[in-house]
Image: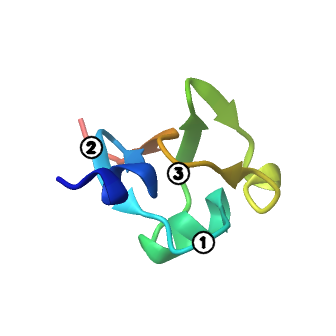
Amino acid sequence: MSATLQAAAVFVNDRPHPLAGPTALEGLLEGLGLAQGKGVAAAVNGHVVPRSAWGERMLSPNDRVLVIRATQGG
């Protein structure tokens, strides 16, 4: 992986995702098809970000984003 990609990427569940420029958590989750889903929680660098703050939480290169989706079943 090139240094350029690493410098301009965040890590979502430990996988690199490039940043195309200033990106809010909500924009990242929309791009992943997760922003509208129910039962989705997100944390950035180990801190839970409430859904109401997703649009305001800007991401920086090398941020670690953890996305959890609740599922039904047993």
| Between discs 1 and 3, the one toward the N terminus | 1
- How many angstroms separate mark 1 from mark 3 (CA)? 24 Å
Query: Residue at 61% across / 48% down in the picture?
Result: 60
Question: Tag 2's secondary structure?
Answer: loop
Q: Position of residue 20 (x, y in %)?
A: 51, 74
| Between discs 2 and 3, the one toward the N terminus | 3
Could you say which is closer to the camera, residue 60 or residue 38?
Answer: 60
| Between discs 2 and 1, the one toward the N terminus | 1
- How many angstroms separate mark 2 from mark 1 (CA)? 38 Å
Q: Position of residue 7 (x, y in %)?
A: 43, 50
Q: Are marks 1 and 3 in contact (CB under 8 Å)?
A: no
**What amino acid does circle 2 point to?**
Gly
Q: Which mark is residue 12?
A: none
- As drawn, the residue found furthest toward the top would be 46
Whether residue 70 is visible: no
Query: Residue at 56% across / 43% down in the picture?
Result: 42
Q: Position of residue 66 (x, y in %)?
A: 45, 38
Per the image, the residue denoted by label 2 is 73
Whether residue 56 is visible: yes
* Colouring scheme applied when the structure was drawn: rainbow
Query: Residue at 53% across / 51% down in the picture?
Result: 39
**What amino acid does circle 3 point to?**
Val
Per the image, the residue denoted by label 1 is 21
Q: How many marks?
A: 3
Mark 2: few, some, or many residues within 10 Å (few <14, many ≥20)? few
- As drawn, the residue found furthest toward the front would be 3
Question: Tag 1's secondary structure?
Answer: loop
Q: Which mark is residue 40?
A: 3
Quarter of the figure with the C terminus: top left
Please state if 2 lies on the left or on the right of 44 as rendered.
Answer: left
